[in-house]
Amino acid sequence: MMLSRRAALAILLAGTAACSSTPPKVYTLVTVPGASIGGRPVTASVALVDIPKYLDRPQIVRRSGAVQLGVDEFERWGEPLANMVQRVLADDLTARLPSGSVVTTSRTLSGDEALTVELALGRFDPDADGTVVLEAQWRLRRKSGGRAKTETARITRRPADDTAATEVRAMSDALGELADRIAQGMR
């Protein structure tokens, strides 16, 4: 009887060691090239990005049904999702605005920015079939005053397959399209 307990303990420890030796895969959103709009250079900042609380976690979240979310412990974001969206959106906007434009995040504000972009995401995750859905509302505030402009968008992207890497790439593409729309409103 004692040998079987030791054998069971050894099997349990070996199984635990095997699981803990699997390192998580870490992902990041990337800047997506876009067409530059014409006009004078713009200075802008991307204010803090608001994301749904269910996405505010290190793991990548996917929908596995109409009301069920899936979280894989071994597929993680390289930084908090809201910070990453803020940083990549600022880079995407810089790539789309006229040469000489400067877009910063709220962490690097100089106070001289002519425009501020406020972004609230209602959703930014893959559906059960893998289609990435980005639902966003943004507001452009001009330092010179005037009426703030608020717009919404629902952008979908279908990844080539159901791997996390292609889903994250599709998320980057959706964020790039959002940057296209925001940049058009900044003219």
Image (spheres, rainbow, N blue to C red):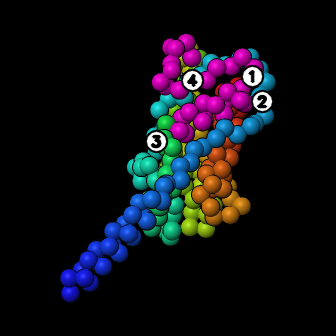
Q: What residue is pinned by disc 4?
A: 104
Q: Is residue 85 magenta?
A: yes
Q: Is residue 3 magenta?
A: no
Tell me if label 3 and label 1 are in contact, CB under 8 Å. Answer: no
Q: What residue is pinned by disc 3?
A: 80
Q: Position of residue 175 (x, y in %)?
A: 63, 43
**Bounds of the magenta segment:** 84-113
Query: The residue tagged with tag 1: helix, strand or loop?
Result: loop
Kindly identify which numbered label has been placed on residue 36.
2
Tell me the quadrant of the picture where the C terminus can be found. top right
> In this picture, is 144 found above or below 97?
above
Q: Position of residue 169 (x, y in %)?
A: 66, 50
Q: CA distance from mark 3 to mark 1?
A: 29 Å
Q: CA distance from mark 3 to mark 4?
A: 18 Å
Q: Amino acid at mark 2?
A: Ser
The residue mark sitting in front, 3 or 4, is 3
Mark before the other along the chain sequence, 4 or 2? 2
Query: The residue tagged with tag 3: helix, strand or loop?
Result: loop
- Residue at the far bottom: name it: 1
Mark before the other along the chain sequence, 3 or 4? 3
Q: Amino acid at mark 1?
A: Pro
Q: CA distance from mark 4 to mark 1?
A: 15 Å
